[in-house]
Image: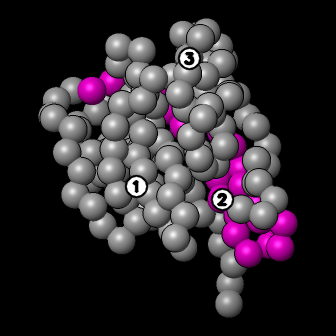
Amino acid sequence: MKKTIRIRVSGVLSEKGKVLLVQHEKNGKQYWLLPGGGVDFGETLEEALEREFLEETSLKVRTMKPILISEVVAPNGSRHGLHFVFLVKRISGKLKVIPDKRLRSASFVSWEKILRLAFFPDMSRLLLSLYRKKFATSLKFTGNIWIPGA
């Protein structure tokens, strides 16, 4: 079996001191993450992000700027992902989630609370730092942020 790198894109929608997160469940574990998903062949990062946001949250967003690139490499070599995070702005829509096999819910969460959530991949401290700097810093690259045992 040929191993490939999965490209994922997600967005930070920050409104009124809160950030939009989606809740997923996999293998009996619930966790929170930024709205987003996989990039399809022939799709730009921005197109994928706007499509995924609409699918997961029913919100139409505009991609503003990249703020973070991270890599996730499983220690056993089973998975390798490249994750692009963008700042987004809501264009229209009301938050509505249609649960599926993994997606459970979505809600705006206070920035300070994200540190207490099961957040995957765990970039909560870095995201909070970027928020406190009003996302005015240059693009960040974290390198591998795989959590052993996850």
Q: What amino acid is labelled 2 in the image?
A: Gly
Q: Which residue is mark 3?
A: 131
Secondary element at tag 1: loop
Q: Which residue is mark 1?
A: 43
Q: Which residue is mark 2?
A: 81
Secondary element at tag 3: helix
Q: Is 74 in front, or is 100?
A: 100
Q: Is 9 in front, or is 19?
A: 19
* Residue density around tag 3, few if under 14, some if 14–19, many if 20 or more, within 10 Å: some
State whether residue 28 appears in this view. Answer: yes
* Residue density around tag 2, few if under 14, some if 14–19, many if 20 or more, within 10 Å: some
Residue 21 is situated, as x and y percent measured from the top left of the image, at 42, 39
Residue 53 is situated, as x and y percent measured from the top left of the image, at 32, 45
What range of the chain is rendered magenta? 69-90
Image quadrant for the N terminus? bottom right
Foreground label between 3 and 1 = 3
Splitting the image into 4 quarters, where does residue 58 fall? top left
Name the residue: 70% across, 69% down.
79
